[in-house]
Amino acid sequence: MQITFAASEATPFAKTGGLADVVGALPRELVKRGHKVTVFLPFYARVRRFIEGEPKYAIRSLTIPFRYYNRFVGVVDAGLRDGVQHYFIDCPELFDRKELYGPSGAEYIDNAERFGLFCRAVIEASKWLGVPDVFHVHDWQSALIPVYLRTLYRQDPDLLGAATVLTIHNAAYQGAFPPKTTEELLFPWDVFTMDRLEQYDHFNFLKGGVVFSDMLTTVSKKYAEEIKTAEFGEQLDGVLLKRAADLRGILNGVDYSLWDPAKDGHLATHYTPENLDGKRACRADLLHAFGLESVEETTPVIGIVSRFAKQKGFDILAEITEEIAERDVAVVALGTHDPYYENLFRAWAFRHPGNIAMQIRYDEALAHKIEAGSDMFLMPSRYEPCGLNQIYSLKYGTVPIVRATGGLDDTIEEWDAKKGTGTGFKFEGFDPEDLLAEIDRALDAFQNRKTWERLMRNGMARDHSWRGPAKQYERVYEEAVQKAGTRD
């Protein structure tokens, strides 16, 4: 099968979150399974560093029309990487910018034009480079591809059989723009209706993808159920309920070539489930990196690597920071985003310099060190479509403490000390006391080294590679092709 991925980010080229990890890893697994896979990305400024010398163009110029003008884009041929063909949509005036979506958490005012152009350019480029059996599009930034195919390109003979699959990585980000976006992107006004792209008087990219795609997926089974409810559906629960028969929850895999303590190049030393000695050296290296060398060997270390935002549950954590600091525990945190929560962590570390430390930035190497050097990993998210850090933690023998939502609930099995089963600790609801109680359970369990190592090894034995998810996506692609072949 020939599959084309279209996304706004992918490792190693451009990353702000888990979307990039998925688009970086899933295509490689599909190639291993015998499929031909192409990935399209915008040619951002940060992507250019991956091109040696002058860019090689597969297509020198494509004309992308807008209401009052045309834009001309090139398609950069980045070649094969692990069997996956990569192309970059080059439009310097729209993509040659420092940030992917906007400065300092804001949005560029022309994002509708930027990603509308990206979607249409992927379709036009595919007509030259090869129309796939399936366009697999990701989140709102590429969600207009199914809309274009079913409207403006409906009668195009080159594209009649192309199926579409939309993966929703986070329903909170939808790409909502003013109504005039409809005509600016040259859509007929009949798409701007409540049963199509209109959502509370906005032109909604993600809703359009939900309505017009042949199949829908999201990144965990639990989240597939949650987004059909008013609590988690971000006002798209109604349209998602209508498409429920075509919605699949497929848990993200992880790339164990990058995340494995037995061979991770970022670590002070390696370790395995059979020989955990190296984890002690990784812990010492981590504490040195955060200036906490005085922490005792018997004191457990809780790690946090996150976007600092309310969604991640830090409003719950904020209410119990002092209670946590009173325990015999150290906390190391790495992240950035919301200034309110950045300052929360700064103040917490200032009040307790001996056992609380933080760094306001993102550092890939340091994230690996936290996964390896921590004893526990904290993710109290209010909602979490999938989450990857808790899965990395399992592999590194770092016991997750999570809220039972989305992929966190799907991936973490509650520890049962009597049976010796389970991989971590989970709490329900939004009560800070419930989170504190779960932390206390983990701290108590840590005191028995023998049972704690059993808990560590339980997690390390779990297989969350991409092999299983890739098989599930194959079935979704087959369903999408079948639907495309029978639609009007």
Image (tube, rainbow, N blue to C red):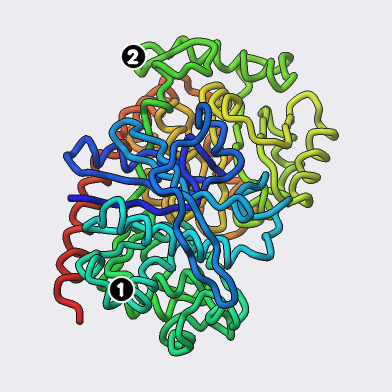
Residue ID at (71%, 14%): 293
Q: In which quadrant is the C terminus drawn? A: bottom left
Residue carrying label 1: 244
Residue ID at (50%, 31%): 51
Residue 274's label in the rendered image is: 2
The disc labelled 2 sits on which kind of residue? Glu
> Along the line of sight, which residue is nearer the eye, 432 or 138?
138
> Along the line of sight, which residue is nearer the eye, 121 or 37?
121
Mark 1 falls on what kind of element?
A: helix
Residue 14: x, y in percent?
A: 53, 41
Disc 1/disc 2 C-alpha distance (Å): 44 Å
> Along the line of sight, which residue is nearer the eye, 210 or 72?
72
The disc labelled 1 sits on which kind of residue? Ala
Q: How crowded is mark 2: few (under 14 residues within 10 Å), some or many (20 or more)?
A: few
Residue ID at (73%, 43%): 321
Q: How crowded is mark 1: few (under 14 residues within 10 Å), some or many (20 or more)?
A: some
